[in-house]
Amino acid sequence: MEGNKFELHSSMVEKVLREMRKFLTSKGIEKIDVSYPSFHTRVYSFVLNGIRVSVRVAQSTTQEHPVTVNGKRYCYDYRKFHFNFHTHGKPIDTDFIVCVCLDQDGDWSGDFFAFAPKDFKGLTFSLHIGKRPYRGSLAPYRGNWNRLLQVLQSKSKDKPFRSTA
């Protein structure tokens, strides 16, 4: 995908929102309210049924990783994604985070992590692509929108959560 970082982020926000709508509709949630923050107060990307959602987008980069074995040096290239969950060292003020992994061309293959800030305590997350699958603390939230339902339920404690599914 061509364009500057702002355009790339904006298009990913719209794609994420479409995927969220599809998921929620498939779970029987028909009322989906979306609003956007003003540009200057923008720490989150949009508000979905009362929860502030922050979309973080990272494009794959290649990092050389040197290893020395028996005095011989080898260099391996690893793909990685890096996501920030802070602004000037302070955690972002949001209710839900979606990390979108883009390939080196800026295209989204559908790989994402969707979780609440309390699910991950760090201020940054680096995903290194190797031979083995990622097994870290965010592994349960990879490619999975189910945490979104739990966050929506906890936000609407005043009103009973109803699903027609």
Image (tube, grey):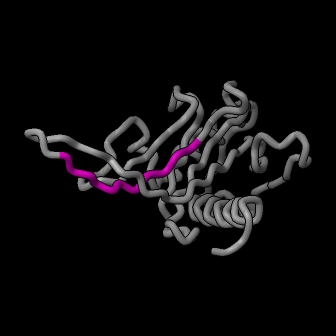
| Residue 165 visible | no
Vertical order, 18 against 69 (above or below): below
Q: Nearer the viewer, residue 25 or 144?
A: 144
Please give left or right for residue 76 compared with residue 91 in the image: left
Vertical order, 53 against 131 (above or below): above
Location of the N terminus by quadrant is: bottom right
Vertical order, 138 against 106 (above or below): above
Q: Where are the magenta residues, as a range?
A: 73-83
Residue 105 lies in quadrant = bottom right
Residue at screen point 36% across, 51% down: 64
Q: How many numbered tags mark residues here? A: 0
Please give left or right for residue 86 compared with residue 50 in the image: left
Residue 90, image x, y percentages: 69, 25
Location of the C terminus by quadrant is: bottom right
Q: Nearer the viewer, residue 24 or 20?
A: 20
Q: Main structural element of the magenta stretch: helix, strand or loop?
A: strand
Residue 70, image x, y percentages: 8, 39
Residue at screen point 59% across, 46% down: 148
As for residue 74 lying within the magenta part, the answer is yes
Residue at screen point 66% across, 32% down: 86
Residue 5 lies in quadrant = bottom right
As for residue 86 lying within the magenta part, the answer is no
Residue at the left extreme? 70
Residue 110, image x, y percentages: 50, 66
| Residue 14 visible | yes
Residue at the front extreme? 71
Residue 163, image x, y percentages: 62, 52
Residue at the bottom extreme? 2
Residue at screen point 51% across, 31% down: 120
Please give left or right for residue 139 compared with residue 41 in the image: left
